[in-house]
Image (spheres, rainbow, N blue to C red):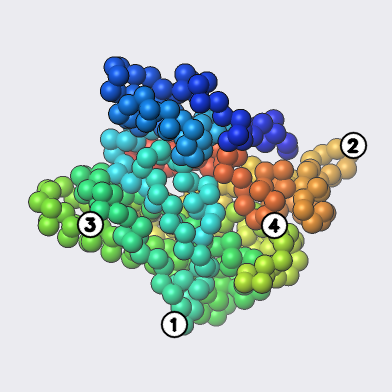
Amino acid sequence: MVTSLGRRRVKKADINEEVEFGKAIISADDSQFLCTFCGCDLQSEDQARKHVVGWKHFRRARMVSSALACPSFDASASSVVGRIVAIGDCHGGRTCSLLLPQRTRSAFHGGSIYSRTCRDGGRQLPSLMSALRHQDLDHVCDGKWLVAIWSYGEIDVRCHASRWSGNGVGQEECEGGTALSLARAYVCAVLHEAEAAACAARAYQRGSGAASEARVYSIILAVPPASAGRNNDRAPFVGELIDRVAATKELNAALSEACREAGAGEALVFTGEDTWNFAMTSHQQHDGQLKVTAATSGPDNVAAVPGSLNADLSDGHVHVRSDLCGPVHSRLRDLLIRGLGLVA
Ligand SMILES: [Zn+2]
């Protein structure tokens, strides 16, 4: 599938300050300006003009033109969500960093589920609290939710799938020895990190004299589609693409199962095994024969494998382009509306 959206990408050089100012800024008087795209207050016309040609506004404007933005959700979420942190590998930040303007932070901490949660002497998951600044803490201590969107797994599939893929449940369940044990260790570590962050926020709150409870809502982002990729010495693409596609499917099914096991009582959800279907190549019935759509024109010109990353939606490497992640945004919004009881 090729969307017209993909072809219509705004470049920063195309931005005309006058036009952008007229489109985005409203003002009550000479000292109060509001950017209707970003939802931010600006104190003078000069500041507002600088803002509309800045990167932050540019990214937001591109998002609005890509139909990623949802002002009604932003308005209802702003009173309930203190901060959203997209934490983990590069897919999390790229996908979610513009989910809720002014409230979302992305914290890149590379690695795999295996290296972060299973391997002996391996690193721990990054600390959620370390992604927050003091002013963020004031927001999440105000009775509002801290939402953590965790993203790991793409490196597991890219480099390590042979370690666990194909091992059925019921085989020897050493940690990380099967997709399910890998997923369970991840979910367990995410819940542990949520508890640690809630404790730290409570401690901060006592110090600041605020009264309300700190709450953390954890979302695990599904593993994005496998791609042919390019050479990368630090994280090489191991094995055949078709096997990595199967491993991605297996890991996402395991994440779904592990999150279900963790129970509805926990403030933890998985975005779903079908999260990234929109960004995959697929089979299509054509003249009575199965035909693979798109993705034959990627950088490596590899024949497409159904279920792999659709090159038309990728940035030429392993990522789905941020401005085309609308379906993930709408899924995250639905999860937050249901999970946090937002008024849609
Ligand atoms: Zn703006």
Question: Which residue is the site of mark 1?
Answer: 121
Task: State yes or no: Cβ of the residue under disc 2 lies below 8 Å from any atom of ligand 1.
Answer: no
Q: Is mark 2 on a helix, strand or loop?
A: loop
Say which amino acid is labelled 4.
Answer: Ser
Numbered badge on residue 201: 3
Q: How far apart are marks 4 and 2 (CA)?
A: 27 Å
Q: Distance between the residues labelled 4 and 1?
A: 30 Å
Q: Tell me: 189 left or right of 274.
A: left
Q: Nearer the viewer's eye, disc 1 or disc 2?
A: 1
Say which amino acid is labelled 2.
Answer: Asp
The reply to whether residue 3 is in sight is no
Q: Which residue appears at 50% of the width and 73% of the height?
A: 115
Q: Distance between the residues labelled 2 and 3?
A: 60 Å
Spot occupied by residue 128 in the image (x, y as percentages of width and height)? 35, 60
Q: Which of the image's four quarters has the N terminus?
A: top right
Q: Which residue lies furthest to the bottom in this view?
A: 120
